[in-house]
Image (tube, coloured by chain):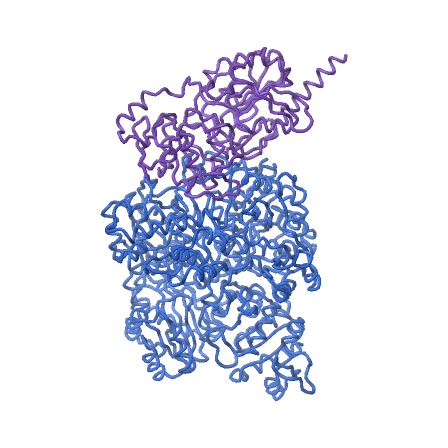
Chain colours: A purple, B blue
Amino acid sequence: MTEAVLVLEDGRVFRGESFGAIGETIGEIVFSTGMTGYQETLTDPSYKGQIVAMTAPHIGNTGVNDEDFESRRIWVDGYVVRDPARVRSSWRANRSLDDELSAQGVVGISGVDTRALTRHLRERGSMRGAISSSSADVESLLARVNAAPTMKGASFLADVTTEQTYVVPAVGEKRFTVAAIDLGIKGMTPRRMAERGIEVHVMPATSTFEEVAAVAPDGVFMSNGPGDPAAADHAVALLKQVLAAGIPYFGICLGNQIFGRALDRGTYKLVYGHRGINQPVQDLTTGKVEITAHNHGFAVDAPLAGQFDTPFGPGRVTHVCLNDDVVEGLALLDQPAFSVQYHPEAAAGPHDAAYLFDRFVELMQTDKTGADVQAGA
Amino acid sequence: MPKRTDIKSVLVIGSGPIVIGQACEFDYSGTQACRVLREEGIRVILINSNPATIMTDPEFADATYVEPITPEFVEKVIAKERPDALLATLGGQTALNAAIQMHDAGVLKKYDVELIGASIDAIQKGENRESFKEVVATLPPEWGAESANSVICHTMQECLDGVEGLGGYPVVVRPSFTMGGSGSGLAYDEADLHRIAGSGLALSPTTEVLLEESILGWKEYELEVMRDTADNVVIVCSIENFDPMGVHTGDSITVAPAMTLTDVEYQRLRDISIGIIREVGVDTGGCNIQFAVNPEDGRIVVIEMNPRVSRSSALASKATGFPIAKIAAKVAIGYTLDEIPNDITAKTPASFEPTLDYVVVKVPRFAFEKFPAADPTLTTHMKSVGEAMAIGRNFTEALQKALRSLERPEAVFDWSKTWVELDKQTLLEQVAVPHDGRIKKVMDAIRAGATPEEIFDATKIDPWFVDQLALINEIAVDLIDAPELSPSLLRRAKRHGFSDVQLGRIRGMSEDVVRGVRHALGVRPVYKTVDTCAAEFAATTPYHYSSYDEETEVAPRTRPAVLILGSGPNRIGQGIEFDYSCVHAAMALSDAPNGLGGYETIMVNCNPETVSTDYDTADRLYFEPLTLEDVLEIVHAEQQAGPVAGVIVQLGGQTPLGLAAGLEAAGVPIVGTQPAAIELAEERGAFARVLAEAGLVAPKNGMATTFDHAKEIADEIGYPVLVRPSYVLGGRGMEIVYDEETLADYIGRATEISPDRPVLVDRFLDDAIEIDVDALYDGHELFLGGVMEHIEEAGVHSGDSACALPPITLGDLEIQRIREATEAIAHGVGVRGLVNIQFALSSDILYVIEANPRASRTVPFVSKATATKLAKAAARLMLGETIAELRAAGALPATGDGGRLPDNAPIAVKEAVMPFNRFRTYEGTYVDTLLGPEMRSTGEVMGFDAGFGQAFAKSQAGAQNGLPTSGKVFVSVANRDKRHMIFPVKRLADLGFEILATSGTAVVLARNGVKATVIRKLNEEPLDGQVRSTIVEKIHDQDVQLIINTPHGVTSGGSPRIDGYEIRTAAVAEGIPCITTVQGLAAAVQGIEALIEGSIGVTSLQDWGRIVTEARG
């Protein structure tokens, strides 16, 4: 048992035991309230740059399997738990979480009063912090934390995006081609699209409009991803070109924030973000409430009621989080483009919002039919 | 969608008496529903026969009918009140069945009553197994939801054929439309099948059972689902059973949230649950869905759904802070989830899914010690009588807290012996069969060296849970081996739920010393908050639990606090009645006139089924075990937060009373009757001196610490004698002993006998009238709450005997004697608050049997019967007000009391409800039904009407089997009872009943001019002129409508004479009323007369209250 320490930038210290790799790590400390799905959370690229604290006390009970990875590796920069499992119990488990964290060099801490930590972050906002199981020198650790960059203006796209375009083939008959810009895409997203007859071309974040147009997409998609949307200028410029070309668009998470920026809306950092799988979102177009998976520290600034002007005609907020009235979805009224801040692909999380992929299909279908009709005329 | 405006009045059906499988959780849900509906300006009409419920307090409904929940009476209420809608999804299976009966009989249509919550169609679809299977089959195949392979059977032959179709034994047998899995079981062979399916067919209202492939040993889960009219659906809670498939969920240790599912599997269960609630068509409200998951490959079998709020809903509500019943009532009248605020955060809506940052463990409490003949193996047929829940920041902490919450020393893990009694192999064999206390055996097996694999193979308990037990054991071993109790070791032990008592036993120290060391080292618990959201949002509701963690969340306060200690898990002898009193204290003290804006009421309890553990009953709630350690820590935490006026120990039954001395010794102020006074009443010698000073007599008695001593006392008093251990509630271990041999047998079985724990030997008063009194005393003045006359003679435990209030045969003079005796005892003992005294009147001598300086089981009954809130008044007396002040303030009647009721006051009859039909012997037969000094009832009903006959008839209809108005009566009585039965049996004959009797009884009847058909007993050969079939056969043929059978001779330890036993158990199996005392017979005759007259109506408590209040002037 190696002792470990968690130091926050405001000087609060939590002591515990090391979990996963031994070492030191610095990042933005955030908490996630999901009771299931730690494997998906750890491998979600949106967590790049962050140390994640789990509010659920028992983590690791079902071990790690080869099927539930959301990307090729673990992305969190540190992991804080209370009671890690000593054994794994699941017919699908291949190895233990502790071993997996160690193997991937993820520094974690266990035995922490994660509720006290969560309350601290809730009251004071997400902040930088460090875990160390290699040094007990809190003073110098704190100095390093305060010297570290903040999340504001941070970009990790180069770290998380794919180097090369790869294609996820449609399941069954191919109906559409989608260019998916990988800003840190989760594996479940192309799968959800593929299930609907979409051939998904997952492309690097640096892709140009010409490269996108080259795959002759029926629609363009922008994924979730880490960092400050204000720093994602390239993606915003790309999306503006896509919208100007009238190509149907669907965005998730960072893809929602990019969409917001492309529509000339600002983005801002939430005090402590939304990270969990129990968040109530209302679809303002139907009034229905869906329980959704969230992982976002930034949000789009837009009026909840009525329309707003954009370079592409009027837009509106389509979805809102009922907990705190944060904008959770946007759409253009005169053009086939929409996005949501949360995660319809779930993984982890409920499947209530899966209909959004159907909505994307419908947009592309309508667009295609319209184009065919025009071509025929 | 906002509230519907077309519903102006709603009839809410409660769940009736507490029975196994349906306990006070439905008081909790019904109370919430009534409260919500009234807040919405809807006229609430309530029917519930159970007087011990909070929901039947007159202020919770506009019209409260404490009437039997039978089709006849429900229709009478509907006809009288003409409600717009009927809400039946919050009163358990009883309410749901009543609603179905009302629908089937055309009553709902006739009176134009809309069923809200769930439609008849949805109820049928959800509850009928065949149509439910069809529902499951409609789900998308990729979700992988299956039903267990099964076959529906209506006859025994179909059952036999069915087993072959399923691929042989074992098979699960489940009767349709019964509650708590009543009548279900696992058949390993044909004999089992005959037994289980046979009674299942009889129990099912539709004569239908389902045979199912065995999925024994699979992981078991339950999801609580909530839906609104806009089709928004949320999962409130997931629950995982520690005990795998094969044990009824009510008897399983259960854990929330689910611990061993990945998100992929959990979301699949979630999708299936939502698909099912939509397909079944539960429009609004809560339901639960149970799953089995194969641990080998994840195959999912949907077991069943309840299209209503259930026991698990209560657990889920307490486990998450999401008030399912309240929300269910709101969505039933049209609100959508997003329109309803989450009470706990006040800012976020109810349309979300609670997330937990703690672990909840529920453990069942059994009562097998009350039914020594019953088979304690746990099956799909629920047998537990109560449960305790605990919350901790991890599983080990929650589990150990839950086990100590059971208040059974033997339930807690114990390492005081350094060896395990049994070898590994024997232990593995024992743990393979689920039984009460299995988890301790599993721990023993771990100690005996069993590997996790061996334990999983034997029990199928998930390896993660097994490892958690191993972790607890490793810590215990470290504690045993450590040279001293180091701070880090102590912290680690506390973090995993070890109590001071456990640590003391391991280290050979007293609990106090451990606590002293712990406090010296600064190792104390912190208090966290149940907030539905894992601290994502600030909580406004102080619903706390302890944990050994870093940061505490108890808020400072200015008003003085009063801690109310609850009654813990339900058990026979201590249940909802005590919760009722605790809830009343909380209501009374929050705004008591203390010049400080009332008291801050703080409830401490660990029973998730109760109203007291609703987060808005008291100002603060601590969901904690009721042990000295846990209560002292709460007191300490609250003393840090503000002034503490004191602790109330006299309302929650024996549990808090047992803590009084320890609390006082630790310097905690007890309000009301002081611990010394409690001791005075409970300690025999001291109490005898109180009686002597007051010139009162007790039946001759003595206290023995050995058999020889007991024999000496018995010889002096003369047999029969009543023997019992000291310090017990509900007459545990009490028996009537007729001779020396049985006395020796009793002492042999009372293993706990010692100089500290003597056995009491009392003269048994044959043929005495037993009288129960509840009274308030403030040190100067007595308020006689009520005088109850038992219908059965002394010797039957007061909790099991029916009683009438006002007393039906006592005159003013006798009541005056009782009043004086009560006052003398209350004064002599030093009561401040409530006192309950039992008297026996024999040969015109008033004997004092016992005095309990606390709230009794009958407080709610008396309060309702006399329209007086005794518990509320008691709470205020305890904090210093006087009876005169309470009278002046309107908290008690200005004049008179329960001993002086107006002449036109109604008669209330309390009847006990027995659980005999839940228990089987090892041979598979029912356990015997005789009443005795050991309390065995689980609940009670009240019959309320202008006359005794009507009230008694209602009490019988409400309790279980209503009295017949025609047909055949079978009479077989003991010799000593023959004189007393002649007149009532003659009256039954005059009323048109055909009399059947055993030969001896028939002869006596014939001599008295009553013609009786002689019927053969089980062991008699048929003679000329006798009916060929035996009485037992006739009972099974439903060819008898009423049975009168008093015990022949001695009964002891569950081994009564055989023929009477066969008759009584057959009556239980067939649901035929069976009267076992002559006094009960006389009362039944009066009831039958009233029924035949046809004059029985329904009157609300509010109307009765007005009559009584006006008459009082």
B747 to B176, vertically: above or below: below
Query: Depth check: A61 or A364 in front?
Result: A61
B318 to B157, vertically: above or below: above
Q: Which residue lies at the image location 50% right of the left edge and 81% below the top edge?
A: B1049
Query: Depth check: A30 or B12 in front?
Result: A30
Asked whether, in this view, residue B986 is left or right of residue B889, the answer is right
Which quarter of the rendering shows the C terminus of chain B?
bottom left
Q: Position of residue B232 (x, y in %)?
A: 58, 37
Q: Which residue lies at the image location 30% right of the left edge and 23% below the top edge?
A: A144
Query: Depth check: B75 or B655 in front?
Result: B655
B580 to B830, vertically: above or below: above
Q: Which residue lies at the image location 37% right of the left edge and 20% below the top edge?
A: A150
Query: Depth check: B946 or B439 in front?
Result: B439
Q: Position of residue A325 (x, y in %)?
A: 49, 27
Q: Quadrant of residue B404?
A: bottom left
Which quarter of the rendering shows the N terminus of chain B?
top right
Asked whether, in this view, residue A142 is left or right of residue B566, the answer is left
Q: Position of residue B403 (x, y in %)?
A: 40, 55
Q: Position of residue B963 (x, y in %)?
A: 61, 69
Q: Quadrant of residue A180?
A: top right
Asked whether, in this view, residue B202 is left or right of residue A17, the answer is right
Asked if residue B810 can be seen in this view, the reply is no
